Image (cartoon, rainbow, N blue to C red):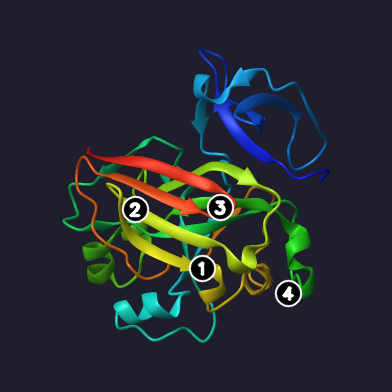
């Protein structure tokens, strides 16, 4: 894949969205396809002059439920014996600084900070020891959830699937050890969630292996690896910031539809 870098998708003025890379608060375009052959062009724009978009538009988003022991506990749920999978639709993806919309169907929408794995190669029946070779990089995800609907429905498609319920960003970091990433979530500056990925029940390697034994993972697909304890409500006007050590911060505001 070449050397380590931060990949973004961005928009400048009226131009079409494009892939880029970041170096010291400046952005340059990437020619070609990040998962294949690409060339980095000069970093010609200050970061504040561009609009950062979701760094990837995934073909599918596979999520892992209750992958932190303390989060399972806060919902009085057993810790799973194998990864508990569900999916979010690609239509739920938004990027940094986009609005999360509170749907009229729900009275209780909550944040869930997660390490998001971006796949770089087709993966099927991958062994855990080889799994990281198939990963392109890592970004942050917020698995926004309508908690009341999740409890009511029993299965999670509706509660997890609303438009705007999958913020991703701010960029893809290709050089990261997923074993011990400090994740945190703040709402209006107050710390709500803080834990390390070392507390995960199933590691990134185990998740890639398990999921790839069910379905082929394709380049650009995203695995949301679960959320630590401390999930809580989001209200109109709130700012929610999901941070990952070595990645950055994904910030979104909350609005009514």
Q: Are marks 2 and 4 in contact (CB under 8 Å)?
A: no
Secondary structure state at the residue bearing disc 4? helix
The numbered dot on residue 60 is 3
**Mark 1 Cα shell of 10 Å, populated few (<14), some (14-19), many (≥20):** some
The numbered dot on residue 128 is 4
Residue occupying image coordinates x 52% and y 62%: 182
Q: CA distance from mark 1 to mark 4?
A: 20 Å
Residue occupying image coordinates x 33% and y 47%: 240
Q: Which residue is mark 1?
A: 196
Please name whichever residue, 197 or 25, is drawn nearer the observer in this view of the structure: 25
Of the numbered discs 2 and 4, the one sitting upstream in the chain is: 4
The numbered dot on residue 26 is none
Farthest residue to the top: give it: 14
Secondary structure state at the residue bearing disc 3? loop
Q: Which residue is mark 2?
A: 186
Select label 2 or label 4 by which is in front: 2
**Mark 2 Cα shell of 10 Å, populated few (<14), some (14-19), many (≥20):** some
Residue 241 at x, y percent in the picture:
38, 47
* Residue 90, placed above or below residue 152: above
């Amino acid at each position: 894949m070449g050397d380590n870098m931060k990949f973004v998708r961005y928009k400048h003025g009226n131009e079409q969205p494009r892939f880029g890379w970041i170096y010291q608060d400046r952005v340059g375009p990437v020619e070609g396809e990040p998962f294949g052959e690409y060339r980095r062009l000069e970093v010609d724009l200050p970061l504040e002059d561009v609009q950062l978009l979701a760094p990837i538009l995934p073909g599918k988003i596979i999520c892992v439920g209750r992958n932190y022991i303390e989060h399972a506990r806060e919902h009085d749920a057993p810790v799973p014996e194998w990864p508990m999978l569900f999916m979010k639709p690609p239509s739920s993806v938004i990027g940094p600084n986009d609005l999360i919309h509170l749907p009229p169907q729900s009275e209780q929408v909550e944040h869930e900070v997660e390490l998001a794995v971006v796949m770089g190669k087709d993966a099927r029946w991958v062994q855990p020891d080889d799994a990281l070779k198939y990963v392109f990089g890592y970004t942050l995800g917020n698995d926004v959830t309508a908690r009341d609907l999740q409890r009511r429905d029993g299965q999670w498609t509706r509660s997890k699937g609303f438009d705007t319920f999958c913020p991703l960003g701010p960029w893809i970091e290709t050089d990261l050890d997923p074993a011990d990433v400090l994740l945190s979530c703040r709402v209006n500056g107050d710390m709500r969630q803080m834990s390390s990925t070392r507390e995960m029940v199933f590691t990134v390697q185990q998740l890639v292996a398990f999921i790839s034994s069910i379905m082929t993972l394709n380049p650009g697909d995203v695995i949301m690896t679960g959320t630590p304890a401390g999930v809580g409500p989001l209200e109109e006007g709130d700012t929610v910031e999901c941070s990952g050590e070595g990645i950055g911060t994904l910030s979104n505001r909350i609005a009514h539809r």
